[in-house]
Image (spheres, helix red, strand yellow):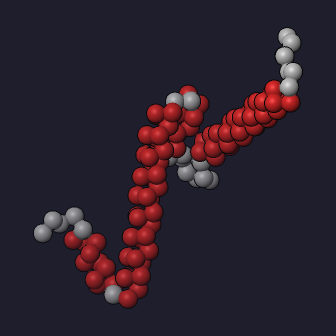
Amino acid sequence: MRLPIASRQAWQDFKNAGVAALRGRRVTDEAVAQLLAWDEFLHTPVIGAQPATESMALVQTLRDQDLEAYGKALEALAAAHERKNRARRCTELLGALRAGHSLLASRLIDDADDPN
């Protein structure tokens, strides 16, 4: 294959195309490495726990390279993370309330399921 590079501009264009191609390849390689790292991280449970269903769904979308499913799975994982953070914060607040007013904390727990 011969490339007709007859001018300084043609050489510059050729060089720029090569640099862009290499940059694109580097970005692709970095993205693949990041996806593999996420796969490993999401697939590995915390000691004594099973991976979250949302984590496993996200791992599968990474493996399938399904962009639409990945977006949905990422949103589901973020929502699960938010729920877990809220539950943790509620537990912390209830502990603080118990320390200051144990009767009120007990009443809140007893009445939690009562809509009235």
Residue at the bottom extreme of this rendering: 100
Residue that appears at 43% across and 40% down: 72
Residue that appears at 40% across and 58% down: 83
Q: Quadrant of residue 95?
A: bottom left
| Image quarter hosting the N terminus | top right
Residue 59, compared with residue 47, is above or below; it is above
Evaluate whether residue 67 shows in this view. Answer: yes
Residue 85, compared with residue 11, is above or below; it is below
Residue at the front extreme of this rendering: 7
Residue that appears at 60% across and 42% down: 43
Please state the horizontal and vertical placement of residue 88, each as a whole percent of the image: 45, 66
Judging depth in this view, the residue of 104 and 77 nearest the camera is: 77
Residue 61, compared with residue 52, is above or below; it is above
| Image quarter hosting the C terminus | bottom left
Residue at the top extreme of this rendering: 1
17 sits left or right of 7 in the view = left
Residue that appears at 24% across and 68% down: 112
Judging depth in this view, the residue of 44 and 85 nearest the camera is: 85
Please state the horizontal and vertical placement of residue 16, each as a whole percent of the image: 78, 34
Judging depth in this view, the residue of 116 and 106 nearest the camera is: 116
Residue at the left extreme of this rendering: 116
Judging depth in this view, the residue of 67 and 43 nearest the camera is: 67
Please state the horizontal and vertical placement of residue 54, each as a whole percent of the image: 47, 43
88 sits left or right of 105 in the view = right
Q: In which quarter of the image is residue 37?
A: top right
Q: How many labels does the image show?
A: 0
Residue 34, compared with residue 101, is above or below; it is above
Evaluate whether residue 33 shows in this view. Answer: no
